Amino acid sequence: MTSWQNNRAARDARIAAGAGLAHGKVVEASDATRLLEAVIRPGDRVCLEGDNQKQADLLSRALLAVDLSKVNDLHMVQSGVVLPEHLDLFDRGVAKRLDYAYSGPQSARIARMLFGGKIELGAVHTYLELFARYFIDLTPHVALIAAVSADRDGNLYTGPNTEDTPTVVEATAFKDGVVIAQVNEIVETVPRVDIPADRVHFVVKSDKPFFVEPLFTRDPAAITEGQILTAMLAIKGIYAPYGVQRINHGIGFSTAAIELLLPTFGERLGLKGRIATHFALNPHPALIPAIESGWVRQIHSFGSEVGMDDYIRARSDVYFTGPDGSLRSNRAFCQTAGLYACDMFIGSTLQIDLQGNSSTVTASRIAGFGGAPNMGSDARGRRHPSEPWLKAGAEADPDSPAPLRRGRKLVVQIGETFGDKNVPLFVEKLDAIELAEKLNLELAPVMIYGDDVTHIVTEEGVANLLLCRTAQEREQAIRGVAGYTDVGRGRDRSMVAQLRERGVIRRPEDIGINPLDADRNMLAARSIKDLVRWSGGLYAPPSKFRNW
Amino acid sequence: MTAPLSHIAPAERARSTSFNEASARTRLDLLLDAGSLVEFIGPEQREVSPHLEIFGLPEQFDDGIVVGHGRLGGAPVFVAAQEGRFMGGAFGEVHGAKLTGLLRAAREIGSIPVLILLDTGGVRLQEANAGELAIAEIMRAVMEARSAGVKVIGLIGGRSGCYGGGGLIAGCCSALAVSEAGRIAVSGPEVIETNRGVEEFDSRDRALVWRTMGGKHRRLLGAADVFADDTVQDFREAALELIGLIGPFGLDRLKAEQGRLADRLRRFGACQDAVDVWTVEGVAHAETVPELPADQFIALADRIGRSSRDAR
């Protein structure tokens, strides 16, 4: 007779194999590798939790140390390839195949290993896309996750950095997989239950807290006057005319400048309450002055940020918090919110081509996508109207009858024409295409496709691509704000002048901004210490950001 | 805070301008009596470094230092300000010669104080020997000027700190004013880490860097006599205060300084961390010193901090 519960039986056998090492569900850190050898089978799909912030670092070290005769050829399905151990797994032969979303600090090594054939690549995803595949064709057999604390039953408290955990556990535990959590401490009662105990099979107590990277802290002291100018152009040239209230910001210095200009420049323009009230955003310290000045009504977060815990706890009107008072983040929900409930994404990139395609890939680095492609794309399934969405839709397609016209999400690329180390932002051909050719990828790793981009902001002005009617106009609109880069110098001057007359390109003076007013004194905070002061001492920056 | 800068009166600008962030020229403009700065060998003369071109590096027409004279509270002063944003304010041949010449002019006149706004990582490596020689010449010129009765005051609060030869020159000055952001030392954090290992000094632990080399520690130890909040106006007031405080200079002073430094080593030589030093000095809850706002810290320093007024 056919059995329809083979997977459940296999799961029970794995748990039984690990149970010998556990007291109840609790396993000593020194037994972690033996636990993994007992539970994981060769060729398993394994999710080793790690994203751009928190890392299940103890479990990744434990997995790296397994006996290769027991565990090998794993298929890693995880958000982040961030720790050196994540790639050591492939060097050692513990793992063979990889599907992932983000690889910030390992971007150079992962490119070398892909090129050398050490890693069999499934695909590079966005977060939301990888999460979706957890429920369709990349469901983990074993999930190795990180939490702050557990009780003896296995209820988990993830702390403010909940992030991916609920999604990973949902896909694993409800499809006959095994969930193993590393925790910083075992407690009598957890402050709140982020993951219920019946979804957690083993708990390993770590000797030190899991690693969290403060990825979203931008030191106001490093913001340049060029970035301030682009931020002013964005506020007065885009936020104000569209009345954008629901926003996701990227993590660059230009958007940090915007956050710090709201209580000064924005206030002077009388925009308080009319723009930038609701965010899908990590707890950026740079947003503290705007929050304290009453600009921001609500923020939902993908993850947390080191040093912001006490501030968030004290500002629960703004942030999502649990019954214990601490932040509850959730990457999958926040990505969905950014995709469907925000009217604008604004962020920086490394390269923009003549069609407006952008990429953060350079010839030797694959940083992955993270969340930006979802934040920076028009959601075709969106059905609720809003003023900025309808206005952008009307600009893009003035001739269709309004009831049948799709709105458009505002997708804004912001940056200086020459970026870090004077590398031009605008290029004829993206390095991503060269990389795709080199690695034989079917898709070039494009972060945001040109047809999703609605505006480009540089110190030379704002290009509104919604108003372009032909590919040629679009190219000239991009060249027209590309400054003295080769792309900018290749512009057709008369066509750029026409585009300016039509308001497709707007120079600072067209928007009523004097570039000489772009002064650091306009920032609501000019240093990390200023942010601490704004927060009333609640923000506790990590040591690497201090200069006192 | 948000009005265009040109509409604001000079004194108000000096109060609202961060010394740390301002350029060398802005610092001098706002530090001195309005409109009184007269520059020597200004950028229009294009006295650039003869060395940088060899390395294909950009030059600056003033070689990263502004020297000149002006008025402070109505009285004449000589001034020099390093531009920390050009090659980290490092000393090259021309850069150094401008400061040496200023100090020698002050020595000849004998009565006009010199303010040096130090903002430097030390010697410009590309100009190796010329830069090292410049440091030696400047130190000699400082001591000769002081011997001739000139008050030489260092003002330190720039982004590049005051490192390498700059730290040595600071040690030769009659007195120093420093802000929290200012750092004074000879070897920088990365140099120490490279030579002695990360266990000895973690250069990325910025809280450690600042409590070891930063302005608050230097003030509590007596290396700096005045602690300034980070505005140009505060540095202006500090300079005025120091000009009034500095006494005569001679062999007795140098002997007293030697005694002060020997005593410092005796008292704090066994301390492992600046917090230990502050604790030995009698600061209650020494670990909170880095968090103290300027006014509270100044009150603490006036009560507990040392000064070198009888020495140096």
Image: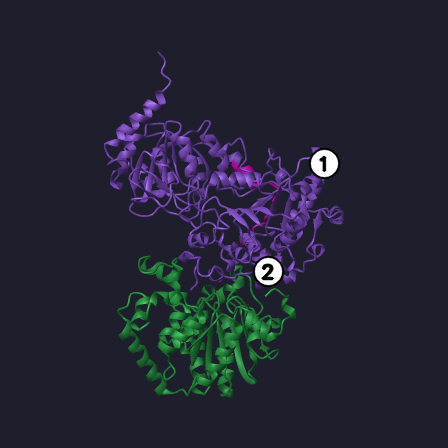
**Residue A78, visible in the rendered structure:** no
Question: At which x and y percent is residue B258?
Answer: 32, 80
* Residue type at tag 2: Thr
Q: Colour of chain B?
A: green
User: Which mark's residue is nearer the viewer, 1 or 2?
Assistant: 1
- Which region is colored magenta? A421-435
Q: How crowded is mark 1: few (under 14 residues within 10 Å), some or many (20 or more)?
A: few
Q: Could you tell whether A203 is left or right of A257 in the image?
A: left
Quarter the N terminus of chain B occupies: bottom right
Question: At which x and y percent is residue A469?
Answer: 72, 39
Q: Could you tell whether B261 is left or right of B239 in the image?
A: left
Q: Could you tell whether A345 is left or right of A470 in the image?
A: left
Was residue A427 drawn as part of the magenta stretch in this picture?
yes
Q: Distance between the residues labelled 1 and 2?
A: 37 Å
Q: Colour of chain A?
A: purple
Identify the residue under disc 2. Answer: A264
Q: Could you tell whether B111 is left or right of A66 in the image?
A: right
Q: Kindly indicate the quadrant of the structure image that contains residue B216.
A: bottom left
Q: Residues within 10 Å of mark 2 (few under 14, many from 20)?
A: many
Residues at circles 1 and 2 in contact by the CB criterion of under 8 Å: no
- Give the residue drawn at x 72%, y 54%: A510
Question: At which x and y percent is residue A311?
Answer: 45, 55
Front residue of B139 and B240: B240
